[in-house]
Image (cartoon, rainbow, N blue to C red):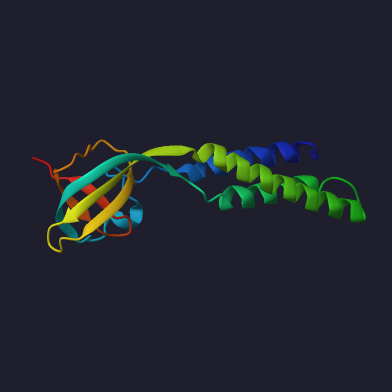
């Protein structure tokens, strides 16, 4: 059973990293926190739109899970000081591998940088949001929705 531990831990790490991916937040998807929250909304006009890439720079989850899995897997090797050294090395290698795995699964997500002129205040505001079904163009009337995840939405109809 000792030899099966590393395989089980690597499988659990892969499943945990997959679970971290989640759904992209854009105009089509709301987080559970935002779904039942009143969000101040204002009319706005699109001034500029440009395609950009959203890159996830946070590899904390992969680093922590990889480090834990590597440390636990390596703790089955050796005895005494050798085991402690193997555990430390396994945790370091696992943390690095987990971080790199999360970078690979995060990738670059297509997004829009949308600049709008808010009608009430006249202020320019720029929002970056992932690509959803909505398309935006200069001069388009939209809704500027503020909340946990500020977003721009086209006015239907």
The residue at the point 27 percent across, 51 percent down is 151
- Number of on-image labels: 0
- Depth check, front residue: 38 or 56: 56
Q: Residue furthest left?
A: 157
- Depth check, front residue: 2 or 153: 153
Residue 73 visible in the shown view: yes
The residue at the point 34 percent across, 53 percent down is 32
Residue 29 figure quarter: top left
Left or right: 103 with respect to 138?
right
Q: Where is residue 72 in the image (x, y as percent from the top left)?
A: 74, 49
Q: Position of residue 44 (x, y in %)?
A: 15, 53
Residue 39 vertical placement versus 14 (above, below): below
The residue at the point 30 percent across, 56 percent down is 34
The residue at the point 90 percent across, 51 percent down is 82
Residue 72 visible in the shown view: no
Left or right: 74 with respect to 14?
right
Left or right: 13 with respect to 70?
left
Left or right: 46 with respect to 71?
left
Q: Where is residue 129 in the image (x, y as percent from the top left)?
A: 33, 46
- Depth check, front residue: 8 or 20: 20
Q: Where is residue 59 in the image (x, y as percent from the top left)?
A: 56, 49
Image quadrant holding the C terminus, namely: top left
- Depth check, front residue: 14 or 138: 138
Image quadrant holding the N terminus, namely: top right
């Amino acid at each position: 059973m000792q030899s099966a531990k590393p395989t089980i831990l690597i499988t659990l790490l892969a499943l945990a990293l997959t679970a971290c991916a989640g759904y992209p937040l854009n105009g089509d998807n709301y987080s559970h926190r935002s779904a039942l929250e009143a969000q101040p909304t204002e009319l706005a006009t699109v001034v500029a739109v440009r395609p950009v890439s959203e890159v996830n720079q946070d590899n904390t989850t992969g680093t922590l899970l990889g480090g834990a899995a590597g440390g636990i897997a390596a703790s089955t090797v050796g005895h005494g000081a050798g085991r402690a050294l193997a555990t430390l090395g396994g945790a370091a290698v696992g943390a690095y591998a987990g971080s790199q795995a999360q970078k690979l699964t995060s990738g670059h997500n297509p997004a829009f940088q949308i600049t709008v002129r808010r009608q009430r205040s006249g202020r320019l505001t720029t929002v970056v949001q992932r690509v959803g079904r909505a398309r935006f163009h200069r001069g388009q009337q939209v809704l500027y929705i503020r909340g946990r995840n500020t977003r721009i939405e086209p006015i239907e109809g």
